[in-house]
Image (tube, grey):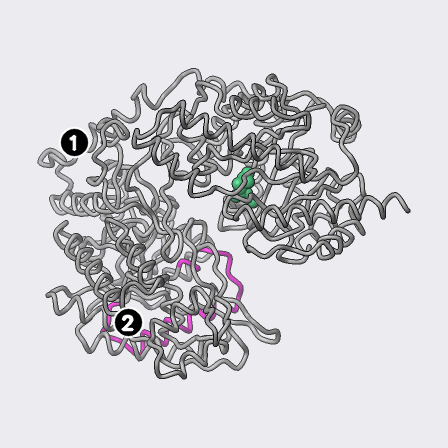
Amino acid sequence: MITHNLGYPRIGNQRELKKGLEQFWAGKISEEELRTIGSKIRQQNWQTQVDAGLNLVPSNDFSFYDHVLDTSLMLGAIPERYQVLVDNQHNSELDVYFAMARGLQTEQADIQAMEMTKWFDTNYHYIVPEFTKNQDFKRFSNKAIQNFEEAKSLGIITKPVLVGPVTFLLLGKEKEAGFERIDLLDKILPIYIEILQELAAKGAIWVQLDEPCLTLDLTENEIIAFQKAYQTIRESVPALKILLATYFECSGDNINLATSLPVNCLHIDLVRCPAQLGDILTLKHFVDSDKSLSLGVVDGRNIWKTDYKKALSFIQTANEQLATDRLLIAPSCSLLHAPCDLDLEKNETVLTPEIKSWFAFAKQKLTEVVALGKIADSKYDLNISLAFAENQRVIEHRKTSVLIHKPFVKQRVAEITPTDSVRQNPFPIRQKLQLKALQLPLFPTTTIGSFPQTDEVRKLRADLKKGVISQIEYDNFIEKEIEKSIIWQEKIGLDVLVHGEFERNDMVEYFGEQLSGYVFTQNGWVQSYGSRCVKPPIIYGDVERTTPMTVRWSKFAQSKTNKLMKGMLTGPITILQWSFVRDDQPRRTTAFQIALAIRDEVLDLENAGIKVIQIDEPAIREGLPLRKADWENYLQWATEAFRLSASKVKDVTQIHTHMCYSEFNDIIKHIADMDADVITIETSRSQMELLEAFVNFQYPNEIGPGVYDIHSPRVPEVNEMVELLEKALVNIPARNLWVNPDCGLKTRKWAETEKALQNMILATQELRIMALAE
Ligand code: GLN
Ligand code: ZN
């Protein structure tokens, strides 16, 4: 059975790509040196995959920034504003490329970057192609061909990977009205064909075209586009073997389309959608054809060891109907979303051998694919395979390990009742009680939680980790920072203060480190976008809060002021969303476990005298399933998890939540269902446009639309903020309106933060005077 891979992490085992990019952008290394780094990573990746024993390894999966941007460049889909850079002889292809990705600010030019957005439901972000009605495409970058030749010169005939033409168009955005981007298909197909023909001429046997959009809800036009694209490609490159890759979802109602496109092989994601195998095997037109099926049985998006028994049952089921030479084995999707290599985790106190034995990172997943292929080739003779026995030992161990399974936690989740996720009284009653208890002025002012994380703070945290300073020294330092920020907040006149989150490295990691059931890697980096990598914590077991996590700091902060001090927590969905999660129980169950842990913390904060508690949920929208039909179910349990964490408090305790990076229109009803007393949201970049959703829906609770953009160092004028607030006041009752920035201030500098917040207070004062006059 042919074993293959869809894509390998491109950041390098030691994040060489990140480091190289940053040095190049800082002007410290030349383009040639950067290119050498790229080619080293590619060579290493190919060698790793060949050494693992795969039959077919990908090329062109490497990218200096993003594979969708690569595709834009291949097709010459370069927005007009970069044309001056293209025309300038001194600029290399890479100069244009990075300008598109990051924008360009020099003395001569100020060109905006292209937009970035999430790659399906992953945490990877791609650069959104821009389209205009009469756009011309022209072959521009030959990277796909160059990379193929590079591998060939090393003796490896790779399978080049391209983003398929339909998915490429669908991932983009129309920049003007009067056309649909899918109509541009005819213009890009000739370039695809040219490239494919050239690859075939240079010796490529297989090519992988990624069309994950085949798993989404499609319009009639889009279905026709798929048929047309693949018909045309088939006719133009009859000898080249085309592997059409779908992943991240079921083909669902597109199953007939996906299985009837004229390609040589269809790849399906059996981790995300196991049921589609059975469905496909009942399709006579597919079974009777000579097409191959690539079985994605190794999870490309998570860190768990594959259960060989389960994977083999898919392979065997397929093999009963399809001859061995029609089957391929692969990871479910590109390994871009997995950390590179588990062998790099050497610190056994951080990651114990027992827990480590349950994991497989990208490199280990290759071994799994190959092992499964071998077992299949042996006609499923499990007795001869040591690998199988060892795999099953680990899988069984994980099912019963006391490290993972905590009866007490499971019981708590089982005992959740509907009343656990409702406050004692509805919002109007709570609002009256809170008004009296909290004595807040009209248009209360607050911030979102974090204050600038200076180099000094970061250095001390690093020193603590290294053992250079003691816990006591560190804690003293944090206390001083908190005190300083309180004096400062009182001075500028904020109403609800925060402690500043100086003690936190990251809003999820900080909690993960204190919850049981969590583990951290030292090198488990995954690309988020361009040079940015994240190291998601791993939830391996039942989640439990064993001791209070934030009470110490909140209590300390409250003791230093007579004003209200807001407690700061990260919500269960955001914690879930930004971690690697368990694959042995539904996400919902894990979310509820985390929710109960946060609830314990909420109640401890309340007991410690904290009257306002914020539970951040910036990632709630990110968790939306790819298919609309599945949204309702997710939103139900996601909002329930939030309410579960928030609802046990007294009516007078005010619960805040905060959201950002989101459009809210399509989920506003569910945001209201979260029933937070106050929500603060990001709105300033869109000039309050985002607020529209809340207004149209008549959002019932209190709301703080961010009045200035914290992503920019720019200090907003008082007038600007007054105007934004007046805009908000047209539709939001004065009593419900809060004044705050867009998001946390940890990435800002103190100087600009001080000025911006001072102006924000001045704007609020003006507003209060105007309100009095009315
Ligand atoms: N409380 C967090 C902070 O201020 C919220 C961060 C976020 O929304 N991403 O940093
Ligand atoms: Zn935010």
Look at the image and give the residue range highlighted in magenta: 212-241
Q: What secondary structure is found at the residue carrying circle 1?
A: helix
In the drawing, does residue 662 fall left or right of residue 466? right
Q: At x 60% / y 40%, what residue is drawn?
A: 448
x then y, percent, for residue 168 = 42, 67
The label nearer to you, 1 versus 2, is 2
Q: How many marks?
A: 2
Question: Residue at the right extreme?
Answer: 774
Instruction: Report the image quarter containing ligand 1.
Output: top right
Please name the residue that numbered disc 1 is placed on.
390
How many neighbours does mark 1 have within 10 angstroms: few (below 14), some (14-19), or many (20 or more)? few
The quarter holding residue 409 reads: top left
Q: In the image, is residue 165 above or below residue 136? A: above
Q: In the image, is residue 620 above or below residue 710? A: above
Q: What secondary structure is found at the residue carrying circle 2?
A: helix
Please name the residue that numbered disc 2 is placed on.
143
- Name the amino acid, label 1: Glu
Pick the residue in front: 418 or 1: 418
How many neighbours does mark 2 have within 10 angstroms: few (below 14), some (14-19), or many (20 or more)? some
Q: Is residue 222 magenta?
A: yes
Q: Does the magenta stretch include residue 731?
A: no
- Name the amino acid, label 2: Lys
Pick the residue in front: 577 or 215: 577
Residue 619 in view of the camera: no
Q: At x 59% / y 74%, what residue is drawn?
A: 176
The quarter holding residue 386 reads: top left
The mark that comes first in sequence, 1 or 2, is: 2
Q: At x 78% / y 31%, what residue is drawn?
A: 428
x then y, percent, for residue 112 = 51, 68
Q: Distance between the residues labelled 1 and 2?
A: 41 Å
Give the main secondary structure, helix, strand or loop, of the magenta stretch: helix
